[in-house]
Image (spheres, rainbow, N blue to C red):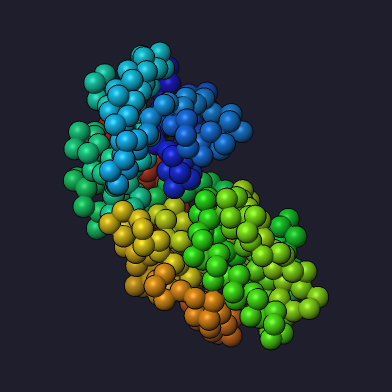
């Protein structure tokens, strides 16, 4: 019998939390063979799941587009077929619990679970949850939330799902080893730029302008920027600089060594996806967060403010983002180590609940029929 099916996906913002939950269940004593992932055959899970060794199934399901488009005509037929397939799969796996991490890819398995009367745990890690999480929460056995202000009903405050290797990051003891593994210099101020798994064009453009300006005026000789631009933007990214003439600039398409990057960076520049915000907090990494204004209901701004409103990160809205504004902000933090330490300390304090085990206990108790006994 399968212990848990974890479902969601489409983007790393859903897949990485799903993997974090599965990894944490294994760390709690469950055999990897007792876990199964269900996602979409169009998402990044097709790249991220196979190397993990976890059982996985990818369904032909698509999300509803905001704009009127012919693609929306296929949403319902595909959802019906995918739900039927998910139902057959759940009948074979017989999971004790289905864990929904959100996104359109989670709908077939969640609907099939409701129909089969399998308990469902909804895990919401955005301050403003998406439509699928809102719908699923109405019938879920339990709802786990990363933030006390979650609008979902009857939530348990558990923190966000964070991978064990992220929780284990030690930014003091692990700094030198992380820099060596990433081939980053030990004697420079390291700025890591990460715009999510797909990259962020606005951030990429501003960083490219910053690098060009600092190279032209000879500044930044003690700075190294490790820039994850996203595979789709790699062709148009500026070339790397080796640092001999000033700033050192490293550009790559995708980074799968995130624990090392959190340990190595003096400062991170990121979007404000829920997983990134939780990981900044859990690791105590000082960050400049640039929320994506195109996110549904501008929820990334809400995510960012959970840190920036308490001095645990610095907010830079995209409307204010430019090479000049970013350069000034990076320079001000570079020149004020005390402020940087204070931001990191505030972030780590906020991340305490993300590092705890209450989410995994809740999932296990729901699987065992003990949901009402959980205290979080």
Work out whether residue 318 can be spotted.
Answer: yes
55 over 183 or under it: above or below? above
Residue 235, quarter of the rendered image: bottom right
Q: Residue at x 24, y 21 (%)?
A: 115
Q: Is residue 361 left or right of residue 120?
A: right
Q: Residue at x 51, y 36 (%)?
A: 45
**x then y, percent, for residue 98:** 35, 29
205 over 360 or under it: above or below? below
Q: Residue at x 46, y 74 (%)?
A: 321
Q: Is residue 221 left or right of residue 59?
A: right
Q: Nearer the viewer, residue 111 or 298?
A: 298
Residue 281, quarter of the rendered image: bottom left
Q: Is residue 253 left or right of residue 140?
A: right
Q: Nearer the viewer, residue 107 or 54?
A: 107
Work out whether residue 268 can be spotted.
Answer: no
**x then y, percent, for residue 100:** 34, 36
Q: Nearer the viewer, residue 59 or 160?
A: 59
Q: Quadrant of the N terminus?
A: top left
Q: Residue at x 54, y 71 (%)?
A: 206
**x then y, percent, for residue 27:** 52, 38
């Amino acid at each position: 019998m399968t212990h848990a099916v974890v479902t969601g996906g489409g983007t790393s913002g859903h897949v990485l939390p799903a993997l974090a939950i599965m990894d944490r269940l294994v760390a709690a004593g469950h055999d990897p063979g007792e876990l199964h992932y269900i996602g979409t055959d169009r998402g990044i899970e097709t790249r991220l799941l196979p190397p993990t060794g976890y059982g996985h199934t990818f369904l032909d399901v698509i999300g509803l587009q905001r704009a009127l488009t012919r693609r929306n005509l296929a949403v319902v037929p595909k959802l019906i077929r995918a739900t039927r397939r998910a139902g057959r799969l759940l009948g074979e796996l017989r999971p004790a619990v289905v864990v929904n991490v959100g996104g359109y890819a989670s709908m077939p398995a969640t609907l099939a679970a409701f129909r089969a009367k399998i308990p469902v745990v909804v895990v919401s890690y955005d301050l403003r949850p998406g439509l699928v999480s809102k719908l699923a929460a109405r019938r879920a056995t339990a709802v786990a939330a990363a933030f006390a202000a979650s609008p979902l009903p009857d939530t348990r405050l558990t923190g966000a799902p964070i991978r064990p290797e992220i929780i284990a990051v030690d930014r003091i003891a692990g700094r030198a080893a992380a820099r060596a593994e990433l081939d980053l210099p030990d004697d420079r101020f390291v700025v890591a730029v990460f715009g999510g798994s797909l990259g962020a064009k606005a951030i990429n453009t501003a960083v490219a302008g910053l690098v060009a300006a600092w190279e032209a005026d000879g500044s930044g000789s003690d700075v190294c920027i490790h820039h994850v631009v996203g595979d789709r933007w790699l062709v148009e990214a500026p070339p790397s600089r080796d640092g001999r003439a000033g700033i050192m600039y490293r550009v790559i398409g995708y980074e799968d060594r995130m624990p090392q990057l959190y340990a190595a960076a003096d400062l991170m520049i990121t979007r404000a996806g829920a997983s990134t915000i939780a990981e900044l907090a859990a690791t105590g990494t000082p960050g400049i967060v640039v929320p994506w204004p195109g996110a549904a209901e501008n929820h990334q701004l809400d995510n960012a403010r959970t840190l920036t409103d308490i001095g645990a990160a610095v907010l830079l809205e995209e409307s204010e983002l430019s090479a000049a504004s970013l350069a000034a902000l990076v320079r001000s933090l570079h020149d004020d180590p005390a402020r940087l330490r204070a931001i990191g300390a505030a972030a780590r304090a906020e991340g305490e609940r993300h590092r705890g085990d209450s989410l995994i206990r809740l999932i296990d108790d729901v699987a065992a029929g003990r949901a009402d006994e959980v205290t979080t």
